[in-house]
Amino acid sequence: MRVAIVHFWLVGIWGGEKVLDALLDLYPDADIFTHVSVPEALPERMRRRIKGTTFINRLPGARRHYQKYLPLMPLALEQLDLTEYDLVISSEAGPAKGVITRPETLHLCYCHSPMRYAWNMYAEYMQQLKWPLRPIARLLMHRIRLWDRASADRVDRFIANSQTVERRIAKYYRRDSLVLYPPVAVERFTPTQEHDGSYLFVSRLVPYKRADLAIEVFNQLGKPLLIVGGGPDETRLRAMAGPSIKFLGRVSDKELDSLYQSCRALVFPAEEDFGMVPVEAMAAGKPVVALARGGASETVVDGVTGVHFDTPTAESLKAAVERLETIAFDAMTIAAHAATFGKSRFLEAFAAEAARAMEALERFGPLGPDRTAQADRAERGRS
């Protein structure tokens, strides 16, 4: 079986790329296609599986400013020739699922989220633009949304990375999806009850990650907060930070593992699609202070593996931190919960769903929303 994986862009290793890497365990001979590739930022086995890029990769400045070429990405995707493949897996968070495949090809979409800047976070992204650009951006995003909705019908089956994303797929694409949490490398951590009293924040420093909220609260509390990551929001955040806040920049995996081991808890104030960072912290036996929205509301068990706070305000987060310090968490219980998000579970479930969908394609022809429901009814009838 010839397998192609279409990923939106490969310019570094974040959550979506970790899923792609796990899929290479399942399909080691798969060919990878993407809009833009920065090979030196990728692991060797991912780099050597890249079969092709779209014409976006050849445009001026694409390696750094690829997102500015978003209006051209639908056209670019449709130029990829995938006729020789039996299984196409699109990894969707930016434009990836809009490829054209043969009727006999199974197209599975593992959806990290429908494009946030086109759908659920559209208003926030518009507010971040300078006002002269907003009318142009609104017009372009209107066209992107039309294409994005139409291209959802090119997918035979959707797999969502969380219940949060499952609801977005249903809302924006009017499609059902299977929820399959992404793989987290939980095996690399050793849980420990020990800590040095510091709190940890790990993320790219962009506005929607809400590092500013964590800084505001820890300025008030005077407790040590270590911030790992870099990004365009760093200058503003450093100007906000008091003496108890320390910026560590980007760190290696080994250094990050050590920080998880030594911290008292992770602070996670963003609404994420899934969020691997809270699971990594829990695998190290550390509780998480998490906003009770998005993926963290599904992975962090309130009072057992961390605490939730309901609204993204300083008052709510401060109360959650204070509550966390009254609870005696057990590191082994926290780590056991994190272990349920490991790689082996993901690979087994993905392989089973691919096999089931391939059988349905052979029996019913191209699936889409109506025939997927028909195939599911037939599957239930047989069982």
Image (cartoon, rainbow, N blue to C red):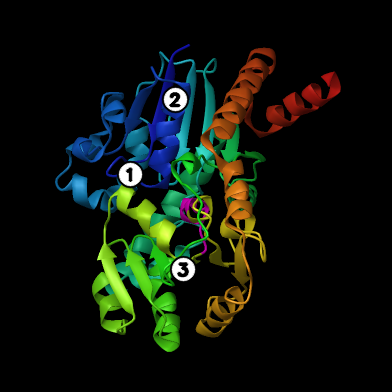
Q: Residue at x 70, y 27 (%)?
A: 371
Residue 25: mark: 2
**Which residue is nearer to you in this view: 207 or 65?**
207
Question: In the drawing, does residue 327 fall left or right of residue 204?
Answer: right
Q: Considering only vertical position in the picture, is 332 above or below 302?
A: above
Q: Residue at x 20, y 50 (%)?
A: 64
Question: In the drawing, does residue 58 fall left or right of residue 36?
Answer: left
Q: Dot 3: what SS?
A: helix
Q: Is residue 274 magenta?
A: yes
Q: Considering only vertical position in the picture, is 297 above or below 347?
A: below
Distance (Cα) linking label 2 and label 1: 16 Å
Which residue extends farthest bottom? 220
Residue 171 at least partly seen = no
Look at mark 1 in the image and give the residue it sits on.
13
Q: Residues within 10 Å of mark 1 (few under 14, many from 20)?
A: some
Task: Report if the CB atoms under discs 3 and 2 are less than 8 Å apart.
Answer: no
Q: Amino acid at mark 1?
A: Ile
